[in-house]
């Protein structure tokens, strides 16, 4: 295959994957014209930021943004700490049943994500955590995928580094914190990005747990946006674009960690 054909194919694939975002942005910038016409028109004319201004003036978006950042930041911190604490002994310590525990953890990945909704809701109800941020965060405070990813990263660390730290008198906590975590920082970056995106886009669980609108994250706030602007698809599209832009910015800032972290564990 020539380079021209290869680049043409990659360009077509890139256009196909980015088409939904481009189409959404085009609708958000329009003030007139059809929305669902075929073939779709990607060039908005006349273009205007009026829909974005309308959404900003109508909805408490700064409050929703702040709520989402708080939830995403707390979820990322919890997962980095708890997943690394769970993955470290599975990768570096010898104890009976280690492989069985790891296999049982992986088996839970086969279960649909919505299986635990009722159990989690009843548990939080008994703990009086409904309509609180801890109620939103606790069911996802540690993920099996995160444990698996960090375990694979821990396995790539040479045993000599661990032995040298022990000879210097370091405890297991010191080895975990000062030796292991800096080495697997690319994998930690990948887990942080995945968790940030998951919480940022999380809709169903916050909608079930939170009852006070002032506590809503952005994804749940957009539900109200679609209700208020049911007759105005362009305003709803503008709100969706405003929700998507921070995710793209975070990915651009963390992409080098993302690419390095995905290969951790692939080569030993």
Image (tube, rainbow, N blue to C red):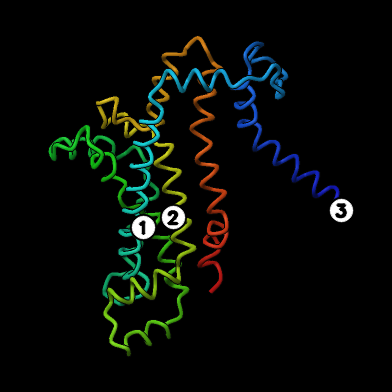
Q: Which mark is drawn over residue 11?
A: none
Q: Earlier in the sequence, mark 2 or mark 1?
A: 1
Q: Along the line of sight, which residue is nearer the eye, 171 or 60?
A: 60
Q: Is residue 243 above or below residue 44?
A: below
Provide the secondary structure element on which disc 2 rests: helix
Q: Which mark is drawn over residue 80?
A: 1
| Label 2 with label 1: CB-CB less than 8 Å | yes
Q: In the picture, residue 116 is in which quadrant? A: top left
Density class for disc 2 (Cα within 10 Å; few <14, some 14-19, many ≥20) is: many
Q: Earlier in the sequence, mark 1 or mark 3?
A: 3
Q: Which mark is drawn over residue 2?
A: 3
In 3D space, how far apart are the residues under numbered discs 2 and 3 (Cα atoms)?
Answer: 37 Å
Q: Which mark is drawn over residue 191?
A: 2
Residue 8 lies, in percent from the top left, at 81, 44
Q: Is residue 203 above or below residue 13?
A: above
Q: Along the line of sight, which residue is nearer the eye, 126 or 53?
A: 53
Density class for disc 1 (Cα within 10 Å; few <14, some 14-19, many ≥20) is: many
In 3D space, how far apart are the residues under numbered discs 1 and 3 (Cα atoms)?
Answer: 44 Å
């Amino acid at each position: 295959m020539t380079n021209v054909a290869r680049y043409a194919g990659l360009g077509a694939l890139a256009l196909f994957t980015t088409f939904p975002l481009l189409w959404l942005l085009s609708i958000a910038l329009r003030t007139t014209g059809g929305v669902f016409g075929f073939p779709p028109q990607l060039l908005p004319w006349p273009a205007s930021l009026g829909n974005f201004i309308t959404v900003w003036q109508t909805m408490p978006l700064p409050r929703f943004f702040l709520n989402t950042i708080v939830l995403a930041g707390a979820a990322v911190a919890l997962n980095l700490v708890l997943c690394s604490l769970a993955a470290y002994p599975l990768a570096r310590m010898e104890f009976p049943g280690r492989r069985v525990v790891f296999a049982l953890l992986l088996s839970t990945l086969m279960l649909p994500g919505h299986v635990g909704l009722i159990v989690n809701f009843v548990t939080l109800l008994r703990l009086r955590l409904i309509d609180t941020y801890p109620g939103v965060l606790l069911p996802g405070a540690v993920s099996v995928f995160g444990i698996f990813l960090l375990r694979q990263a821990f396995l790539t660390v040479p045993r000599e580094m661990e032995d040298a730290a022990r000879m210097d008198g370091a405890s297991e906590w010191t080895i975990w914190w000062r030796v292991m975590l800096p080495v697997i920082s690319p994998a930690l970056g990948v887990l942080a990005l995945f968790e940030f995106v998951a919480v940022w886009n999380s809709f169903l669980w916050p909608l079930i747990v939170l009852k006070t609108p002032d506590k809503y994250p952005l994804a749940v706030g957009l539900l109200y946006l679609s209700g208020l602007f049911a007759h105005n698809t362009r305003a709803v599209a503008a709100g969706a674009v405003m929700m998507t832009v921070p995710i793209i910015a975070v990915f651009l800032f963390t992409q080098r960690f993302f690419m390095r972290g995905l290969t951790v564990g692939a080569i030993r």
